[in-house]
Amino acid sequence: MDILQTVFQGLVDLGASVFLPIVITLIGIILGMKPTKAFSAGLTLGVALVGMNHVMSLMTDSVGAAAQAFVQNTGVQLKALDMGWAPALGLCWTWEYAFLMFPVQIGINILLLAVGFTNCLNVDMWNVGNKVCTAFLVAYVSGNPAIGFACAIIQCVFELKNADCTKYRLQKLTGIPGISMPHPMFLAGIYYYPLTHFLDKIIPDSMNIDAQKIRDKIGIFGENHIMGFIVGCFIGIFGGYDYKEVLTLGVQAGTALTLFPMVAKLFMTALTPVSNGATEFMKKKFHGRDISIGMDWPVMAGRSEHWLMMILAIPVIFIYAIFLPGNIVLPFGGLMDICLIVPLFYLTMGNMLKMAIGTLIGLPLHLYVASYFAPHFTKLAQITGGASVPKGQMLAWFGIDISELRWVFAAASEKNIIAIVILVVTIPLAVYYFKSIKREDMEFAKELGIKTEA
């Protein structure tokens, strides 16, 4: 057991930019690619991850500082500081049972592939940490690690099912064939799909104001760098910056929005040869089954709609944080709220009006869930020494993946009546979601000219 823990912890400690390229290189070789091409694909993925992290850091450091200044100007006291996803997941890895999640996820994926339940080969091993997070949170709330792992296993199964039901939607959005999206954040569709489906009925397609249509109508003001500059300047003004700082923030935000699609192209460069190799390999091993490679969400990062919505949502996040009764979280590390806005982008196919409505509804839920879990993240940090916690403060994660489902699992495990009722309701919601989203996916396949399996 100790050897297993050492091996997996050593791999995780390498970081995503090293760990995932190793995984992709080994998978490429196993799939029959030449070692040099497999290594090139893996290394390109590492370059893409590093590039994306740098651009995201530019965005969060510059925009985040201005947003924090805005909150400080209000004088509001919020005692739980938002860490953001990277420190939060890093803290989860300090949990004593964390290392067991690697064999659990891999074993479930292989088993479900073998019995034909899924056609997704999930290579996104870095997001094993998200299953660790679910298991830890539920275990700490319930006091029972077995319940935590049971909920994490349900999450694994749902992720693979969701990947199967949305792979042509993903190809329509990215242009990359043969991949799918088993990231946990997209399970938010269980709760948000009824909303977006209702919006589809009352908002006509002609009101689709995605970024490309904005570009076509307003010319230069629809370009990424111009939009980023304008929004960045507004945030700087709200943060109380002087004119030099406002202009600098505008340029930084414009730079980030310009670089996102450039870096995103590297994901396509890295993953296309692996996807092609996997397709050929799986045709031989699984007798023509349409196997997809499950990847992390940044393969969609080239689209500008979600980045624009994340930036525009920041002032709203702080208004909610300041005025929502019962909220204790100061949003900071997770200001972009990727795990709400990207799933909404996915469900609405980039319709910014529908995304905006979903964001206004979802942000308060994310703040309340972050407030609920803050004592548990703080307790873990104090027990393991994984992070320092100043006296009188707590650690939180605003924008936690599948906030709604994790809260339902955790709160129901401590016999919260409301959570138990929502958990019961979640079952028919999940059935409705998977059936409906699969039906839509078949329509996307037809649009792409893809002949699907029966």
Image (tube, rainbow, N blue to C red):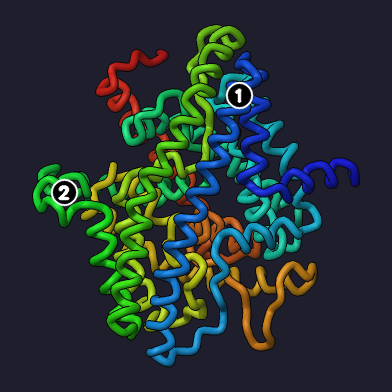
Question: Which sits in the foreground, 253 or 156?
Answer: 253
The 10 Å Cα crowd at callout 2, few under 14, some 14 to 19, many 20 or more, is: some
The residue at which mark 1 appears reads as 38
In the image, 195 versus 286, the foreground residue is: 286
The residue lying at 66 percent from left, 33 percent from top is 23
- Where residue 234 appears, x then y in whole percent? 26, 74
Residue behind mark 2: 215
- Identify the residue shown where x is 26% and y is 53%: 224
Looking at the rendered structure, the kind of residue marked 2 is Arg
Tell me the quarter of the picture where residue 356 sits: bottom left
Please identify the quarter of the rendering in which residue 383 is found: bottom right
Q: Label 2's element?
A: helix
Q: Quadrant of the N terminus?
A: top right
Instruction: State the residue in front, 132 or 201.
Output: 132
Disc 1 element: helix
From the viewer's perspective, is residue 267 above or below residue 312? above
